[in-house]
Each structure stands twice: as C-alpha cells, then as structure tokens.
Amino acid sequence: MPEIILQTRGLSKRFATGDPVLEDVDLDITAGEIFGLIGKSGAGKSTLARCVNFLERPSSGDVLFEGKPLSSLAPRDLYKARRSMGMIFQQFNLLMQRSVLGNVLFPMEIAHWKKSKAVARAKELLDLVKLSDKENAYPATLSGGQRQRVAIARAMALSPRVLLCDEATSALDPETTRGILALLRDINQRLGVTIIVITHEMLVIESICTRVAILDNSHVAEIGPVREVFTHPKTEAARALVQSDGRAERLLRLIESNGLTVEEVLSRVGIV
Ligand SMILES: Nc1ncnc2c1ncn2[C@@H]1O[C@H](COP(=O)(O)OP(=O)(O)OP(=O)(O)O)[C@@H](O)[C@H]1O
Ligand SMILES: [Mg+2]
C-alpha cells in the first residue's frame, strides 16, 4: 500500500470578514507523487497551502501529516511536522540583505545547526540547484529563475518530505519555467520528495503532475489523473478551466516544450 503522507479532512476556512474560503476539503496526497492544485484567482489555493502546514489554522477540520492530526500535536511536534513541509512562493521571499549562501543557511541557523555542518549542507544544496558559482552573490543581482533556485535550496535545507510550491513559476518566462519544473521533477525523482504544485496554469500541471485537484468556489470540484481530468472534465468548473485555457494555444506551447517547431508538426501530420 502506498503511504499517504498528507491528508486534509473536512478542512474549512472562513476569515472574520466574509464567506468561507474553503469548505470541507478532503485530500489524500501519496508519498512521492507530484500533485497539482489548480483553480482560478481567489479560489483559495494559497489559503489551502497555508492551512496544510498550520501557518493558518483551519476554522474546522484537520490536517494529518504522516497520519498524525496536526491539531493534536504539542508545539514541539507541530514545529517538527512543519519543518517537514518546505514552501516556495511566486515572489521568492528571499532575504535581500543576505547573500545566496546566507539565505540557504537561514533555516539551519533557526534550527541551531552547527555552523560547519550548515555551511556544508548549504553548499550541497546550491550544487543541487546548480548555483554553486553564486554563493556570494546577493539576490538583487540574480535573475528570477536563479532567485527561485535559491528559494528551492532554502526550502530543502531541513530535508522536508513535502515541498509546497505556490505559483512558483508564475513570475517566470516559459523557458525559465521549464528549468524550474525540471528541477522540481529531479528533486522528486532523486530525493523522493512529495511535491504539491499550486498554480492557475494548466501547462504547469500537465508538465509535471500525475494527479490534479480543481479548487472551485471553496470546494474540490474534481480530482483525478491529470490526463483524465483535463481531457474528460466531468464538472462545470473543470470544463470552464479547460476551455478558458485555449486549446490551440496550449497545443502550440506543448509542441514548443517538446522542442518541435509548428512546421515540423504540420509536416509530420502531412499538412505541409
Ligand atoms: N488573511 C485573510 N483575511 C481575509 N480574507 C482573506 C485572507 N487571505 C485570503 N483571503 C480571501 O480568501 C480568498 C482566497 O484567497 P487565496 O489567496 O487563497 O486565493 P488563491 O486561489 O491563492 O488566488 P490567486 O490565484 O490570486 O493566488 C480571497 O477572497 C481572499 O480575499
Ligand atoms: Mg494564491
């Protein structure tokens, strides 16, 4: 039986100011999978990401990490569970006054690691994200893709079992996006880290996810294998998402991401 690493059970969230943002969300994330969460702006994706590690307390329901309900954990154990869930964001959230190495060291400093051990680990991580030559650079001098690589190295510092990526490629151009997605896939395959990809872009989900959940109107509208959900949407929310993403445009991007030109494809299917 595959291990279920993360579950939400009846998870609901309502802020003091308004309607529920999440209602009765049940998700089961399998250890080692790359799971996609998609939905339009305001659907509650980021709120769900913050509830999953209790940065935001759910209004009701619970989250189980490795089978243990987070609501019942002592502060020390909750801190441990949180450390097992790394996070990266659209805006990278780097410390601008610290070097690349300083940024990656940060979580290890908070966790009181010995300096020499932390530096060795940080260098190993910068090697993983292919930024070893930038350890003394400052974030302001890096490109968006490089900044996200630093954020990934930092998120991986304490060897999390789960990496939550909230719109991690939304500020990047298509080529840089492909590089970051390839890195995430590599981290998943080589280190076995479970990855949750939160995005409003279908192409991102299609590129690396095995399963996807569609969040709509504070509910999970649909969940299943990516191909099934995107090619045979069963709900109105899924259909709207697939249609609004423009099939022709997606096809072109898919062709491009496979390194083909449109002319090559047309000639292969015998049109030119
Ligand atoms: N701290 C908060 N207080 C009050 N309302 C909030 C708070 N955080 C989020 N919301 C509301 O919850 C809803 C969902 O927001 P959330 O950021 O989770 O959506 P999202 O799916 O991540 O959107 P986007 O794609 O734009 O990032 C929005 O209506 C937002 O205004
Ligand atoms: Mg968001």
Image (spheres, helix red, strand yellow):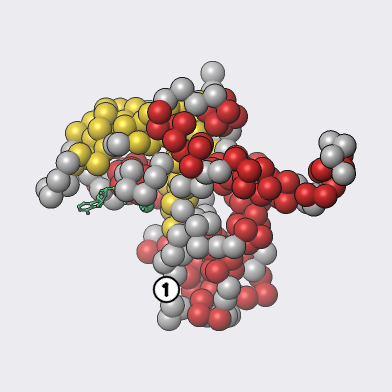
- Which element type, helix, strand or loop, lies under badge 1? loop
Crowd tier of the residue under label 1, counting other residues whose Cα lies within 10 Å: few below 14, some 14–19, many 20 or above: some
The image position of residue 247, as x and y in percent, is 60, 40
- Judging depth in this view, the residue of 152 and 43 nearest the camera is 43
Question: Could one spot residue 162 in this view of the protein?
Answer: no
Is 197 displayed left or right of 10 in the figure?
right
From what the image shows, is residue 110 above or below residue 213? below
**Quadrant location of the C terminus?**
top right
The image position of residue 137, as x and y in percent, is 57, 80
Residue topped by disc 1? 95
Respond yes or no on whether mark 1 lies under 8 Å from ligand 2. Answer: no
Q: How many marks?
A: 1
Is 74 displayed left or right of 29 in the figure?
left
From what the image shows, is residue 24 above or below residue 101? above
- Judging depth in this view, the residue of 49 and 200 nearest the camera is 200
Give the residue at x 44% y 58%: 89
The image position of residue 210, as x and y in percent, is 58, 33
The image position of residue 192, as x and y in percent, is 60, 40
Give the residue at x 39% y 45%: 40
